[in-house]
Image: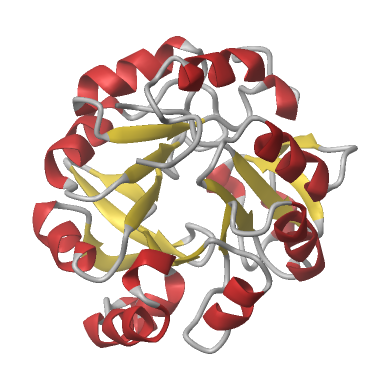
Amino acid sequence: MTIFRPCIDLHEGQVKQIVGGSLSTTEPSTLKTNFVASHPPAYYAQLYRTHKLRGAHVIKLGTNNDAAAKEALAAWPKGLQIGGGITIDNAVEWLDAGADKVIVTSWLFPEGKFSLERLKALSEKIGKDALVVDVSCKRRDDKWIIAMNKWQTPTATEVNAESLAIMARFCSEFLVHAADVEGLCQGIDEELVQRLGEWCTIPVTYAGGGKDISDLSLVEGLSNGKVDLTYGSALDLFGGTGVKFEDCVAWNNSKEDCSTAVR
């Protein structure tokens, strides 16, 4: 059963929608921004709370976002997930600040190589039910390679059945941004969605390229209902014209039990 999962992307303390491939740790001038919100982060958190849209992810894209993130978490304690700069040293702090789960990527890949030891240690410290692994990736020929550092640095790890099975033992969900199409509103990576449906044994949320409400049906069909979908720049909440928030809420409400709990 595919459902809509909302997001709150934070950059320099503001809610924004950014073209994923334009994020850079060295060249800020390359940044391409589709939307800058006039509302504070708490506005979106409260909106999701009102409509019982659990499982929303708050992503801190770079520095100067902690206060904004904590504002969102305070608006819906234990209703949101938090990612961006999460490590074993601060994960408990973010859970105590109100996050339902923490999302981790870069810390698991010291020098670009996956560390199973780090994943095990974090899972043991906070419990796998509180842990989401972000396996956001970029396509390389017929493969998808996990990318860290705001999707700019490719790791040595491929997204496939084997790697996901190993990670799934120590976390409760996956979050997958298709960085090549993130923020472009030009269509999802259909093959990746299909493969995620085949490979994943735990809940997984896909983000990247969603442009129309029909993408929910598309993702459901491609993944056999095993993958959830996030809309960003196409959503009217974030200045988009392709997808209405109320239609996403209606889709979720049409799915048995999904309006009150993440499956």
- The image position of residue 93, as x and y in percent, is 62, 81
Residue drawn where x is 19% and y is 36% of the image: 197
- Colouring: secondary structure
Q: Quadrant of residue 150?
A: bottom right
- The image position of residue 123, as x and y in percent, is 33, 78
Left or right: 59, with 173 as reference point: right
Residue 208 vs 117, above or below: the answer is above
Residue 201 vs 231, above or below: the answer is below
Residue 197 vs 73, above or below: the answer is above
- The image position of residue 189, as x and y in percent, is 33, 30
Q: Quadrant of residue 178?
A: top left
Q: Is residue 131 visible?
A: no
Residue drawn where x is 60% and y is 64% of the image: 99
Left or right: 79, with 14 as reference point: left
Left or right: 243, with 122 as reference point: right
The quadrant the C terminus occupies is top left
The answer to which of 56 and 158 lies nearer the viewer is: 56
Q: Quadrant of residue 225?
A: top left
**What residue occupies the far left of the structure in this picture?**
162
Residue drawn where x is 68% and y is 13% of the image: 241
Q: How many marks?
A: 0
- The image position of residue 159, as x and y in percent, is 22, 54
Residue drawn where x is 72% and y is 45% of the image: 45
The answer to which of 140 and 101 lies nearer the viewer is: 101
Q: Is residue 9 visible?
A: yes
Left or right: 208, with 16 as reference point: left
